[in-house]
Image (cartoon, helix red, strand yellow):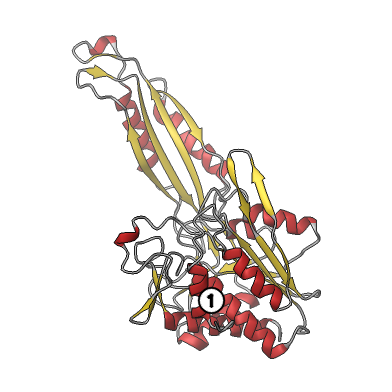
């Protein structure tokens, strides 16, 4: 295997069955290569009651600033039925210019490109390149995200590690390599509404209190007016009901309770606390004295955040444009990622592969995209340590 070939590296990682929370050999593979390249490598394991123990990796070469952090995760979601795949989900097979396998896009392919670019950079520049490169890789991004990046960052901070910028290799491009850099992420808040009634016979409604009309009234109040109109870098916040449940198998019984769950993806005009207060205000106003309800807002570790465009963002955008001919959009769309934790340690942006097949059967990436992403990361490293 060529140690600077992104295809060979991606194949080797895909062949490690690292379905959360299993390490599967992926971190061991990275640790061996990074140590061979001169990195000081550590493998902390974190635990918390009610969650699986998680292995993580931290590696650094260099002792001076600036420190560029390269981050990602080697854990993957389950492949589903292996027989549904055109090629084995952990085979790393190549067919018609595409690399197949769970994690090809999300995000073992991106890690392979980061590693290949770093190895090439060190081969060309040597260990005295005027700064430091650190890898922060977790095995708990697709799982509870409790014993992974958030604790790994705390562990690194306690040791005195400091970072100037971070590049996270999540798949950010919707259609083609070069489409999009993520410079922030929306926050996420989940809530549960329970409307309390009184059970009774449908033929005698005066003896019961049907909670369903009350739940519909509250749901309509949350959806009646937009939460906001968006901000400079974010779309409008969006509330979606994900389930409405009465749990009533009988057609002649008025139920005692009706429940609904909603999720809000919110912009930087809100915090989880201010948004929760606004939701509660709307519900109380709509309920008045007629609807008895309770609201349970789930704890949120997903705030909205923005990395304001600066020279680092421009360097990455310049590298992308030089290799792809596209000037990437600066976006805050999509779901959450471990960038929500990293942003407390240093400015973080995300750029990786095309995400169309992530989490799907036959997850795959174009081999050419692996080569081009490696070239982009190489340009970023050269520019970062030449500034």
Quadrant of the rendering where the C terminus is positioned: bottom right
Which element type, helix, strand or loop, lies under badge 1? helix
Query: Residue 330 versus residue 87: which sits nearer the camera?
Result: 87
Nearest the eye: 111 or 164: 111
Q: Is residue 159 left or right of residue 361?
A: right
Q: Could one spot residue 166 in this view of the protein?
A: no
Could you say which quadrant of the image residue 357 lies in? bottom left
Q: Quadrant of residue 114?
A: bottom right
Determine whether, in the image, residue 86 is placed left or right of residue 21.
left
Residue plotted at (64% across, 78% down): 311
| Residue at 42% from the left image edge and 69% from the top image edge | 91
- Tell me the quarter of the picture where residue 184 sits: bottom right
Above or below residue 291? Residue 242 is below
Give the image location of residue 370, x and y in percent: 48, 79
In this view, 293 is above or below 22: above
> Mark 1 — residue?
9
Q: Is residue 163 visible?
A: yes
């Amino acid at each position: 295997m060529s140690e600077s070939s992104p295809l060979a590296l991606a194949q080797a990682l895909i062949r490690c069955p690292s379905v959360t929370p299993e390490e599967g050999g992926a971190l061991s593979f990275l640790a061996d290569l990074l140590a061979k390249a001169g990195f000081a490598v550590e493998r902390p394991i974190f635990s918390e009651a009610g969650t699986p123990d998680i292995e993580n990796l931290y590696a650094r070469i260099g002792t001076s600033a600036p420190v560029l952090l390269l981050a990602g995760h080697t854990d993957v979601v389950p492949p589903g039925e292996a027989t549904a795949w055109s090629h084995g989900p952990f085979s790393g097979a190549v067919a018609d210019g595409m690399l197949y396998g769970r994690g090809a896009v999300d995000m073992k392919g991106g890690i392979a490109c980061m590693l290949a670019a770093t190895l090439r950079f060190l081969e060309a520049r040597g260990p005295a390149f005027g700064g430091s490169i650190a890898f922060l890789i977790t095995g708990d991004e697709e799982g509870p995200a409790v014993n992974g990046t958030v604790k790994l960052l705390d562990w690194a901070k306690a040791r005195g590690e400091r970072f100037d910028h971070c590049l996270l290799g999540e798949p950010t491009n919707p259609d083609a390599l070069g489409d999009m850099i993520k410079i922030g992420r929306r926050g996420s808040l989940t809530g549960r509404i329970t409307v309390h009634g009184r059970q009774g016979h449908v033929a005698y409604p005066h003896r019961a209190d049907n909670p369903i009309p009350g739940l519909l009234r509250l749901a309509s109040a949350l959806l009646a007016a937009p939460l906001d109109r968006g901000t400079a870098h974010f779309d409008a916040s969006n509330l979606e009901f994900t389930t409405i449940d009465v749990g009533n198998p009988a057609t002649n019984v008025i139920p005692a309770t009706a429940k609904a769950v909603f999720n809000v993806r919110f912009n930087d005009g809100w915090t989880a606390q201010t948004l929760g207060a606004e939701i509660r205000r709307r519900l109380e106003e709509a309920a008045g004295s007629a609807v008895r309800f309770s609201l349970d807002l789930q704890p949120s570790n997903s705030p909205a955040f923005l990395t304001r465009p600066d020279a680092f963002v421009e360097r990455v955008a310049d590298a992308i444009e030089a290799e792809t001919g596209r000037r990437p959009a600066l976006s805050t769309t999509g779901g959450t990622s471990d960038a929500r934790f990293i942003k407390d340690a240093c400015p973080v942006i995300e750029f990786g592969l095309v995400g169309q097949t992530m989490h799907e059967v036959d997850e795959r990436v174009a081999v050419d995209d692996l080569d081009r992403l490696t070239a982009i990361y190489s340009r970023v490293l050269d520019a970062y340590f030449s500034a």
